[in-house]
Each structure stands twice: as C-alpha cells, then as structure tokens.
C-alpha cells in the first residue's frame, strides 16, 4: 500500500464534504487548509500527485452524482473517502434524513467502479453543542455501514470516530472540533496522523 501511495508518478484523490474541502476551491494549490494539506506537507518529496475533491455540504448521494468527473477522471491509484456527517446533520437542522439503506446504496455506488486501493475514513462526531449527543442515534448505523463496506470491499478503514473521541476524552472535544463536526487545526492534524498510522504504517 505505501509503495503505491509514495510513488510520485501516481495520483491519490481525497473525496468528501467540508472536512475534506477546507477551502480548496479558492486555494491556488487546490488543497485547502485541512488534513489533505497536512498530509501533502508531511509526505514531502515522496508524495504522489494529490487531488482534493471535497465539497462542503455534500452527502454520499452528492459524491455519487459527481464521482465520474471529480474522482474517476483522475485515474487514481488510491481513493480516500470521508463522507457521512451531513447525511446525519441534515436530519436535525433541515428535517431531511438519509436512511442507512440509502446511505449504503450511495456509498456502494462510489466503491463499485473503483479498481484501486481505497481508504474509508469514518465520519465522526465530537459532541460540543447541546443536543448533539442525540445525533448518535442517526450516525451510529451509518458508521456500521462504513465499517461493513470496508471489510466487504477490502478497503483500509481509518477509525476516526473511535480514535478522535478517545483523544477528545483527554483534550476536550472543542479542541478538535469547536462545533462538534468541523475540525480545528489540531483536529485536522489528528486526522492526518490517523491516516498515516492506518494507511502508511504496517
């Protein structure tokens, strides 16, 4: 896996929502200022071409709608996906829920056309605001979908929800995501570290 990732002749695509986007569409480098840029900087001269295909507000169904143009067109040697928190959030702020079954169907449509290694990053919630604890009822079934698909498709799972919540227990959730969803700079560094740990380190 690391041989593929560290080959500068290849392309790695990071797909997702605002946690991946991080302003990449107004960044001259196209990387944004989150975990994708952190990984880009840390890999240094060994890095492949890195493409950030995150778009704020996206749900799994939105990724599926733009998958061919935004991901497959790059002929990636590896695809990293972080999606799902908006599938939960929209239930609570817009009364627009996504069922686990619909989420799984959309997620499968992302995975089915890929013929390269895949990394699935768990969507995560670090409750900060009143009422966010109740979001678990919606998010946990979607986390189970991601974990199941990682096994079924032979993908590498980055257990971000589990690991970030462990860190939040000691440093405080707001240190990692001041609204419970969007990472702070420290939160992005933590995600990048988890990605390196589970993807690059044997």
Image: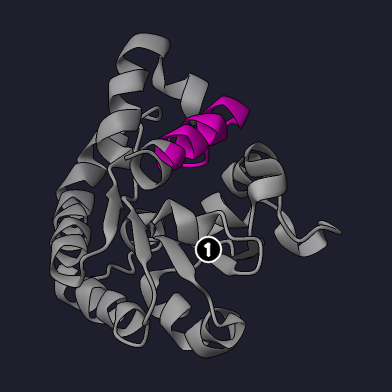
Residue 80 inside the magenta-drawn segment: no
Q: Quadrant of the N terminus?
A: bottom left
Report the side of 108 relative to 94 (left or right). Answer: left
Percent coordinates x, y for residue 76 in the rendering: 53, 75
Q: Quadrant of the C terminus?
A: top left
Q: Which residues are magenta?
A: 180-196
Report the side of 7 relative to 177 (left or right). Answer: right
State the SS at label 1: loop
Please tell me which residue is depicted at 38% across the width and 47% down the height of the picture. Answer: 199
Q: Which of the 4 image quadrants contains residue 29?
A: bottom right
Report the side of 27 relative to 99 (left or right). Answer: right
Secondary structure of the magenta portion, mostly? Answer: helix
Report the side of 53 relative to 129 (left or right). Answer: right
| Residue assigned mark 1 | 57
Q: Which of the 4 image quadrants contains residue 103?
A: bottom left
Residue 192 inside the magenta-drawn segment: yes
| Residue 106 visible somewhere in the drawing | yes
Q: Nearer the viewer, residue 40 or 85?
A: 40
Q: Nearer the viewer, residue 123 or 57?
A: 123
Where is 20 relative to 62, above or below? above
Q: Nearer the viewer, residue 9 or 18?
A: 9
Percent coordinates x, y for residue 92 in the rendering: 33, 54
Please tell me which residue is depicted at 17% across the width and 68% down the height of the picture. Answer: 100
* Chosen colour scheme: one colour
Percent coordinates x, y for residue 170 in the rendering: 34, 10
| Residue 54 visible somewhere in the drawing | no
Please tell me which residue is depicted at 35% across the width and 30% down the height of the picture. Answer: 164
């Amino acid at each position: 896996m690391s041989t593929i990732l560290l080959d500068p002749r290849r392309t790695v695509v990071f797909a997702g929502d605002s946690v991946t986007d991080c302003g990449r569409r107004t960044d001259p480098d196209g990387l944004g200022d989150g975990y994708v840029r952190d990984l880009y900087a840390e890999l240094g001269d060994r890095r492949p071409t890195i493409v950030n295909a995150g778009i704020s507000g996206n749900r799994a169904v939105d990724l599926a709608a733009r998958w061919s143009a935004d991901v497959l067109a790059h002929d990636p040697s590896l695809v990293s996906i972080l999606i799902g928190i908006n599938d939960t959030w929209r239930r609570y702020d817009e009364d627009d829920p996504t069922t686990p079954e619909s989420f799984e169907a959309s997620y499968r449509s992302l995975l089915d056309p890929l013929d390269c290694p895949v990394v699935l990053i768990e969507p995560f919630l670090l409750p900060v605001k009143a009422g966010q604890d109740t979001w678990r009822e919606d998010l946990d079934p979607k986390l189970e979908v991601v974990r199941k698909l990682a096994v079924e498709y032979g993908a590498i799972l980055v257990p971000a929800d589990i690991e970030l919540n462990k860190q939040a227990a000691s440093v405080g959730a707001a240190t990692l995501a001041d609204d419970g969803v969007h990472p702070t700079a420290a939160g992005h560094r933590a995600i990048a570290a988890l990605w390196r740990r589970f993807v690059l380190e044997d």
